[in-house]
Image: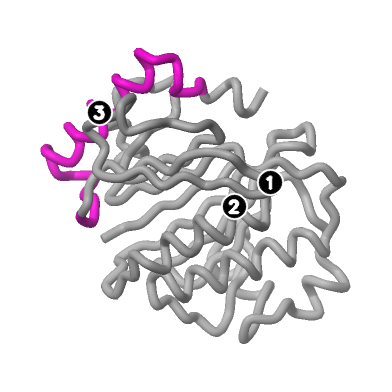
Amino acid sequence: MNLNIELDISLNDKMVKSTVIDIFQFMIEFSKKIASAEPDIWYFCGDSQEEALEYKAFENGKPTSFFTDEYEISNIEGIWAGDDNALVMVSNGSGSVYRLNFDLRRVVSFSFDMLLDLISESAIKFNLIDIRVNTNGYSYHQRNVFPDKLPVGWMLYLNKKITQQQVPMAAQLIHIDNDKNHGTLIISTDHVFDGENKEDIKKANEIEIQLAGLGLLPLIREIYS
């Protein structure tokens, strides 16, 4: 199974290196817990694999001296560990909204509870705009209904309260209410969603149509504009 998790977050402060390091450490830790992925070394991206292997970002869970002392951050930051794990942090250019992308491939051992923990911890740590959880290329291959709106896929968190009456076809709704976020996590299926399975795709599509009809499914450009 290929697992993709995307978080859109709003940062009030100017992005500095210590913030980037803190966010990546958060992402690395949960990658380990969600998919039992425990690579010792995470590398920066490069023009080639040979070049990238020269620049270590994290080793044994800690930032390298190259990262802390020499590396200059930019609007797009990515680290990877082999062919199966990549973490990317992308700025919208204005410095306020950032997308955190977990790309975990060939996941064999998977913890659903840890995935929910990630979402819960993210809601405490960040000012969330949305969270998207998809598998097996659901959004990458554009299996969602509306190309200009957020996909539901397996899970979609929106920073607004949504009721079961509004989306009765959803398997589960989890409400999040804390100092930073007040919204709802929509879970489309009560089993591990398969982005290649026709029935799972149909269920996610039904929820997307329902949310769009109620004016609750945001346009992507509204988030990144």
Q: Position of residue 18 (x, y in %)?
A: 82, 64
- Contact flag, marks 3 and 2 (Cβ < 8 Å): no
Element class at badge 1: loop
Sequence order check: which comes first, mark 3 or mark 2? Answer: 2
Q: Provide the residue designation for mark 1.
A: 180
The residue that mark 2 highlights is: 123
Q: Is residue 142 visible?
A: yes
Residues in magenta? 191-219
Residue kind at label 3, given as amino acid type: Asn
Residue 212: image quadrant is: top left
Given the image, on which type of amino acid does mark 2 rest? Ala
The front one of 86 and 171 is 171
Q: Secondary structure at mark 2?
A: helix
Among numbered discs 1 and 3, the one appearing first in the sequence:
1
Residue 171 in the image: x percent, y percent? 24, 43
Of the pair 46 and 182, the residue shown nearer to us = 182
Q: Disc 1 to disc 3, how far (Cα)?
A: 29 Å
Above/below status of 175 relative to 24: above
Instruction: Report the front residue among 103 and 26.
Output: 26
The reply to whether the C-beta atoms of the residues labelled 1 and 2 are less than 8 Å apart is: yes
Residue 205, which numbered label?
3
Residue 225 spot, x, y in % from top left: 67, 22
Q: Residue at x 46, y 44 (%)?
A: 175
**Residue 207 in magenta stretch:** yes
Q: Residues within 10 Å of mark 2 (few under 14, many from 20)?
A: many
Left/right of residue 135 with respect to residue 26 in the rendered view: left
Residue at screen point 44% across, 29% down: 150
Examine the rendering and report whether any part of residue 51 can be seen.
no
Instruction: Please say which color scheme the image uses.
Output: one colour
Q: Amino acid at mark 1?
A: Lys
In front here: 204 or 63? 204
